[in-house]
Image (tube, rainbow, N blue to C red):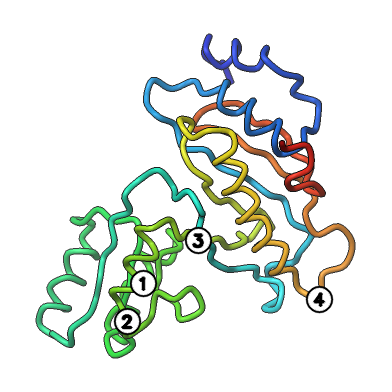
């Protein structure tokens, strides 16, 4: 695949074969953004788990201390208005709405469940484990808008989560990275043998990946 001039220039700024401490990786990733807009910074992990086993299907949430850098659009199913819920479900099914997260009260999940084919592939189906099926929808929405993110392992044992924007300071990105990684590490299943986090990479939108040492968190930071 042919890479852009900006991408090739970004790669020359660091050793792509090196595995960096998180604090160094955050500094590098800020300098290797290749887009004109404020790129999202994402972490990709390769985990030593088998997601086909129920107890190894890693999933969780974390409140990023510095937020995500964007205002999340939250779709809410609440209030017991069945007619209104039906209309909203129809709009979602037809792809007419734009949203980043979905919250529902328990009484409407029977209807929201019909959107499995739409919400499932995007990882947006409300779930009690992630706090998105709740009677306290106000708190759920405020948490999401305040920087709460959800993570889950995919069928290939990879896990992705965002930690902010390229405009964030390296320190803010590190804080968010550490908060998310600590939660991922807490989610390690007891049945998982061998190395849990096999590989960690951080990158900006369309930018090159910077390898991160998954065994380190704040080491090296001032």
Q: Which mark is residue 136?
A: 2
Q: Which mark is residue 140?
A: 1
Q: Residue 144 location in percent, x, y?
A: 38, 62
Q: Which residue is mark 4?
A: 190
Give the residue at x 26% y 65%.
75
Disc 2 + disc 1, Cβ < 8 Å: yes
Disc 1 + disc 3, Cβ < 8 Å: no
Q: Is residue 122 left or right of residue 154?
A: left
Circle 3 Cα neighbour tier, 10 Å, few/some/many (<14 / 14–19 / ≥20): some
Q: Height in image: 67 above or below 109? A: above
How much space separates mark 4 and mark 1, taking CA atoms? Answer: 29 Å
Give the residue at x 49% y 31%.
166
Looking at the rendered structure, the secondary structure element under dot 1 is helix
* Mark in the foreground, 4 or 1: 1
Circle 1 Cα neighbour tier, 10 Å, few/some/many (<14 / 14–19 / ≥20): many
Q: Residue 33 location in percent, x, y?
A: 52, 23
Looking at the rendered structure, the secondary structure element under dot 3 is strand
- Along the polypeptide, which appears first: circle 4 or circle 1? 1
Circle 2 Cα neighbour tier, 10 Å, few/some/many (<14 / 14–19 / ≥20): some
Q: Which residue is mark 3?
A: 63
- Along the polypeptide, which appears first: circle 1 or circle 3? 3
* Mark in the foreground, 4 or 3: 3
- Along the polypeptide, which appears first: circle 2 or circle 3? 3
Q: Where, quadrant-wise, is the N terminus in this rendering?
A: top right
Residue 199: name its quadrant: top right
Q: Is residue 19 left or right of residue 108?
A: right
- Along the polypeptide, which appears first: circle 4 or circle 3? 3
Disc 2 + disc 4, Cβ < 8 Å: no
Circle 4 Cα neighbour tier, 10 Å, few/some/many (<14 / 14–19 / ≥20): few
Q: Residue 81 location in percent, x, y?
A: 13, 85
């Amino acid at each position: 695949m042919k890479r852009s001039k900006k991408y090739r220039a970004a790669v020359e700024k660091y050793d792509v074969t090196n595995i960096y401490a998180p604090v160094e990786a955050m500094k590098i990733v800020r300098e290797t953004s290749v887009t004109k807009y404020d790129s999202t910074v994402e972490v990709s992990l390769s985990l030593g788990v088998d997601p086909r086993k129920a107890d190894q299907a890693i999933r969780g949430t974390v409140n990023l201390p510095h937020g995500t850098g964007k205002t999340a659009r939250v779709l809410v199913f609440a209030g017991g208005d069945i007619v209104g819920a039906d209309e909203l479900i129809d709009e979602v099914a037809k792809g007419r709405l734009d949203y980043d997260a979905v919250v529902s009260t328990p009484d409407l999940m029977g209807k929201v469940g019909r959107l499995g084919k739409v919400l499932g592939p995007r990882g947006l189906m409300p779930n009690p484990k992630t706090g998105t099926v709740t009677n306290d929808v106000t708190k759920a929405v405020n948490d999401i808008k305040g920087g709460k993110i959800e993570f889950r392992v995919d069928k290939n044992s990879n896990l992705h989560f965002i930690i902010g924007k390229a405009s964030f300071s390296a320190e803010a990105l590190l804080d968010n990275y550490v908060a998310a990684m600590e939660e991922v590490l807490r989610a390690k299943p007891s049945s998982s043998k061998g190395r849990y986090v096999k590989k960690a990479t951080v990158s900006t939108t369309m930018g090159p990946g910077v390898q991160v040492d998954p065994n380190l968190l704040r080491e090296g930071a001032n």
